[in-house]
Image: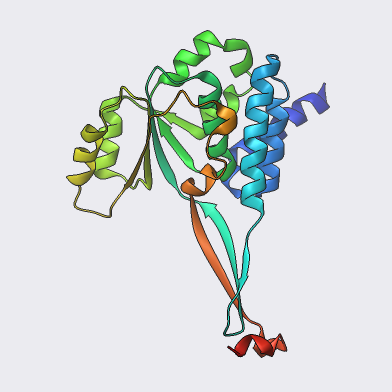
Amino acid sequence: MRNHFKNIEKEQEVHMNWENLSLQKRYDVLLSMINGVKNIKLKNMISNSLTNDYDKLKEHSKQSSITGELNEYYYERKGTIILYFSEEIEFGFFLSFIFCQLLISNKIIMNNILEEYYLLYEKDLDLFRNLFEQQIKIESLTQIQEKLEKDKVNLLVLFGNKINGSQFSKIVSRRNDYIIKIIHESNLQTPLCIIDQDRAFSYCNERVKTTNLTAIGGNTDLLEI
C-alpha cells in the first residue's frame, strides 16, 4: 500500500513539474496514459498522432554552410497558447491536438468544451483528468477576450467552421503590444490520419546552434566555392 501511494505522489510530482521534463519523459508519460484507453480505435488514433509529433520534434536538422559552419535547428515550447474550440470538434482530433501541446509543454488556456467531453467520454478521460486539471486552464469566452487584451499570450488557435475568426482578429488588433499570431483550423472533416504531419512545428519556437567547424579542425573544403 505504501508503494502505491509513493507511485501516486511520483506521478503528481511529474505533472506539477511538467515543463521541466525532457521531451522523452513527457512522451513516455502521455503514451502510458493513452495505453489505458479502452476504445481501440481512439487509442490507436491518438497514439499514432502523438508518436508522429514526438518523432518530428526529436529529430533536429543539421545544415552545413559554405563558410564552414554547422547550423543545428532545435524546437522549443512556444509559451502560452489560447485554444478556442467549437462544439463540432471530433473527439479524436481534439485529444490529439491537446496531447501535441502537452508534449511540447505549452501552457494551455481553452474554453470549457473539455467539460462537455467529460460527460460523453468520462471513462476514458478519467485517465487524463489529473494531468488535464493541472496543465489546462478553462476559461469563458469573456475571460479569453480579456487575456488577449491584457496578458502575455504567444499564440491563438481557433478550431471550427462556426467560429467567427474576425471577432478574435479585432480583439488582437486593439492591443498596443506585440503581435499575436492566429491560426484558424476550419477543415475539420479531414481524417486525423492525413492531418499535416508537421503540425507540431507551428506551435514551437525554433532555436539555431551554430558551430564553426574550420576553427576546430573541420572540413576546410567547405570554404571553397
The residue nearer to you, when weighing 21 against 30, is 30
Q: Nearer the viewer, residue 76 or 13?
A: 76
Q: Is residue 13 visible?
A: no
- Quadrant of the rendering where the N terminus is positioned: top right
Instruction: State the residue at coordinates (56%, 12%).
Output: 121
Residue lying at 20% horizontally and 45% vertically, measured from the top left: 173
Q: Would residue 161 appear left or right of 3 to someone viewing this image?
A: left
Instruction: Give the residue at x 66% y 83%.
Output: 213
Is residue 2 or residue 222 the one in the foreground? Answer: 222
At 79% across and 24% down in the image, what residue appears?
Answer: 4
77 w.r.t. 125: above or below: below
Q: Is residue 97 left or right of residue 47?
A: left
Q: Position of residue 67 (x, y in %)?
A: 57, 85
The percent coordinates of residue 11 (x first, y second) are 69, 33
Q: Quadrant of the C terminus?
A: bottom right
The quadrant where residue 214 appears: bottom right
Q: Is residue 138 above or below residue 27?
A: above
Give residue 161's quadrant in the image.
Answer: top left
Residue 157 on image: x %, y %: 38, 37
